[in-house]
């Protein structure tokens, strides 16, 4: 039976690069659609074109260009940027202020000490789009550079290049994916048969509790009762169910997944904050659903008006 649902979200933990939340009152199709959109269809900015002027390092040009492309760039404004293929300001050339950001790198080693060329050496033409740095400032000395290492140079070696960053999505290339990982699990519901559990000895209870690979159950030191300490640690491995059957106590515990309740874990690459990643994914999903609704209206119009409806759309 089909009916309208009103999904609810409850935030459990939120950091710049990490989010954990509950999604309730919906089904697996919506949860999986949200997960897939976060991974593959939320746009970010990444280096897409590299023009190398001088490279005397040990790495060839293609290797360096590939490493540059995988450096995450801050992309808070990516949703408002244009895709280079759709930009009318530069006729799809992908090198204008509306659809791209220009970077320059100029490094040369002049001492006997190895020079680390890092993402900090990339100079952006737009202060809103810069390389992401997850480094801890306390872990470095004042004179030491931080950032993602691109290449190392010895005395006399030089690297000079120009790079163009463009908007894209993870479906086109993984470098545009804003998500390091996105997972969800069904929230487990666990019911212990207290009457059957009371008939077990303390040793049998310990053996049953220890049969779980993860710390889901424990024994209360005061009452001696088996209790659930962490439902979400359960991995649907069925080990406790098998142990109960081996002990001749089937039905000792009932475990099933709530089909309308999901626990999401989201880790961002740093291109956008984890919270913004979720919000952008919802916005993209809404746009896709609007497109489906519009196409259905178009089909209905064709059925009603035939060739006239197609002609009015320019078809």
Image (spheres, rainbow, N blue to C red):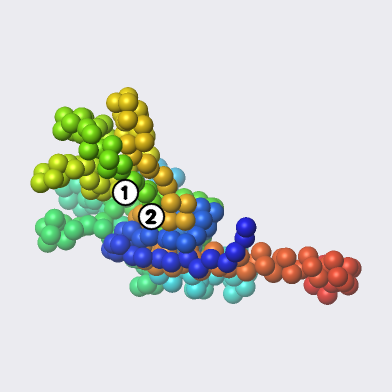
The residue lying at 23 percent from left, 34 percent from top is 199
> Of 33 and 114, which appears nearest the observer?
33
> Of 295 and 314, which appears nearest the observer?
295
Residue 175 placement (x, y as % from top left): 44, 53
The image shows residue 227, relative to residue 204, as above or below, that is: below
Q: How many marks?
A: 2
Kindly report the distance in space between the C-alpha atoms of the residues bearing marks 2 and 1. 9 Å
The residue lying at 47 percent from left, 62 percent from top is 25
The crowd level at tag 2 (other Cα within 10 Å; few <14, some 14-19, many 20+) is many
Q: Is residue 122 visible?
A: no
The residue lying at 38 percent from left, 55 percent from top is 263
Q: Secondary structure at mark 2?
A: strand
> Of 190 and 67, which appears nearest the observer?
190
Which image quadrant: the N terminus? Answer: bottom right
Q: Mark 2 sits on what residue?
A: 263
Query: Does the CB distance between marks 2 and 1 fall below 8 Å?
Result: yes
The mark that comes first in sequence, 2 or 1, is: 1
Q: Mark 1 sits on what residue?
A: 232
Q: Secondary structure at mark 1?
A: helix
The crowd level at tag 1 (other Cα within 10 Å; few <14, some 14-19, many 20+) is some
The image shows residue 132, relative to residue 214, as above or below, that is: below
> Of 122 and 167, which appears nearest the observer?
167
Q: Is residue 245 left or right of residue 51?
A: left
């Amino acid at each position: 039976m089909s009916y309208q649902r009103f999904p609810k979200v409850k935030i459990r933990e939120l950091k710049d690069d990490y989010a954990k939340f509950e999604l309730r009152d919906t089904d697996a199709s919506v949860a999986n659609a949200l997960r897939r959109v976060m991974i593959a269809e939320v746009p970010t900015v990444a280096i897409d074109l590299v023009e190398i002027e001088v490279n005397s390092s040990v790495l060839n040009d293609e290797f360096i260009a590939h490493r540059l492309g995988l450096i995450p760039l801050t992309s808070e404004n990516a949703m408002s940027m244009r895709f280079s293929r759709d930009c009318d300001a530069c006729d799809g050339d992908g090198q204008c202020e509306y659809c791209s950001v220009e970077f320059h790198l100029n490094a040369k080693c002049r001492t006997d000490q190895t020079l680390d060329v890092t993402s900090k050496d990339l100079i952006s033409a737009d202060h809103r789009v810069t390389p992401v740095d997850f480094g801890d400032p306390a872990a470095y000395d004042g004179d030491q550079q931080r950032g993602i290492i691109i290449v190392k140079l010895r005395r006399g070696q030089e690297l000079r290049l120009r790079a163009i960053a463009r908007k894209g999505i993870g479906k086109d290339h993984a470098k545009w994916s804003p998500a390091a990982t996105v997972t969800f699990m069904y929230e487990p519901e666990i019911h212990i048969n207290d009457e059957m559990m009371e008939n077990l000895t303390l040793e049998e209870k310990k053996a049953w509790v220890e049969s779980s690979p993860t710390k889901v159950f424990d024994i209360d030191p005061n009452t001696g009762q088996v209790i659930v300490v962490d439902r979400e640690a359960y991995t649907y491995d069925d080990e406790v169910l098998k142990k109960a059957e081996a002990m001749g106590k089937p039905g000792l515990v009932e475990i099933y997944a709530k089909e309308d309740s999901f626990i999401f874990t989201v880790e961002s690459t740093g291109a956008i904050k984890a919270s913004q990643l979720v919000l952008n994914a919802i916005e993209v999903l809404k746009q896709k659903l609007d497109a489906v609704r519009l196409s259905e209206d178009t089909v209905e119009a064709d059925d009603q008006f035939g060739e006239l409806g197609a002609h009015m759309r320019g078809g």
